[in-house]
Amino acid sequence: MNDSLFVSLDRLLLEFVFQYEQDISTKEDMIQRINKCFEDIKENKATICKIHETINTTDEEISHYYKHSKEIKDNCSDWRPTCDIFHKHEDYMKDQFTIYQETVEKDRKMYHSYICQYKDVLKQYQQKYSETPLSHEYYEKKREHEEIQNRVLACTEQLKMNETIFMEFLVPAPFPSLTSWTLHMVNLRCKTQDTLKHANKFSKRSYELKKEVGDVEIEINYLNQQIARLYEMKNLSETREEKNKNIEKRNKSKERIFEKDEQHVLRLNKTPQSSQLFLPYESQKLVKTIKMHPSEPRVK
């Protein structure tokens, strides 16, 4: 009996020990969990504090932006009439710009037509001028002058080529003897003299042609002046003829009026003198002049 009790007591003690160890382990787990919960609570508190701070800052920003939006709305309401004025001015300026564009296009077309007309007139004058014998002589002399200039340029190019050749010959050449070298130099000298003579001839000819061209230009200018004077004289003669025609028409009309008045006066002379009181003033004047000068011949 005692053994069984001890055995049962041992079992109970073992169970209690095991239970105690389990309780200790659970207690430690619970303590760890509680510590973790405290840490989590601290972290959550810190996050909550941060969130409160951010909420406060956002509230301040919201109030600031609200004030700013109010100011913007007030400014918009203040600037709205000015914006309307600016829009109206913009429309007005657009209309003015279109009008200016249209006027510029019209002026451009008009000036283009004027330029075309002036070009046609210039072509006509050029054709008239080309038909004159002096213009033919001028163009022939000009062509000769250009040909001579081209020849002179060709000669100058040949002279430059010869100069380059001479510069090459200045380098000591391997001549076999002095006689060959002297013969070569004499030949070169003769050639240079010939080229210089040709160049002098061409320069003299070009100078003479320049003089002739200048004389021809002077003659052409003189003829242009005479042509302008002839046009002026024609215009003056036409104006004088028109004036003479107008004067003749006036004289004819005066003669007709005078004949009518004379016939009227002759009729009145046949009537009694009391009827002269009813004559107009101009006819009475004519009657007086006829009576004063009856012997003068009538001008027709």
Image (cartoon, grey):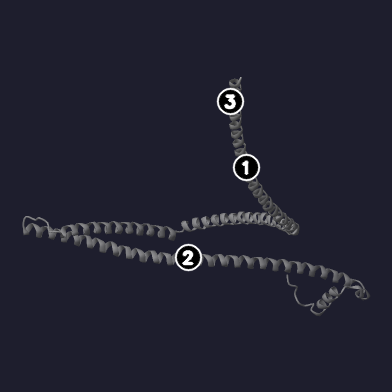
Please report the residue visible at 73 percent of the width from the left and 68 percent of the height from the top.
250
Residue wearing tag 2: 223
Please report the residue visible at 64 percent of the width from the left and 44 percent of the height from the top.
41
The tag on residue 169 is none
The residue positioned farthest toward the right in the image shown: 274
> Looking at the image, is mark 2 or mark 1 nearer the viewer?
1
Q: Is residue 64 left or right of residue 133?
A: right
Nearer the observer, 39 or 113: 39
Nearer the observer, 154 or 205: 154
Q: Amino acid at mark 1?
A: Asp
The image position of residue 79, as x and y in percent, is 73, 59
Task: Determine whether label 3 and label 1 are within 8 Å by CB.
Answer: no
Q: Amino acid at mark 3?
A: Asp
Residue wearing tag 1: 40
Q: Earlier in the sequence, mark 3 or mark 1?
A: 3
The image position of residue 8, as x and y in percent, is 61, 23
Nearer the observer, 200 or 95: 95
- Distance from the alpha carbon under mark 2 to that under mark 3: 159 Å
The image position of residue 131, as x and y in percent, is 47, 56
- Distance from the alpha carbon under mark 3 to that under mark 1: 44 Å
Q: Is residue 119 depicted above or below 288 in this figure? A: above
Q: Amino acid at mark 2?
A: Leu
Residue wearing tag 3: 10
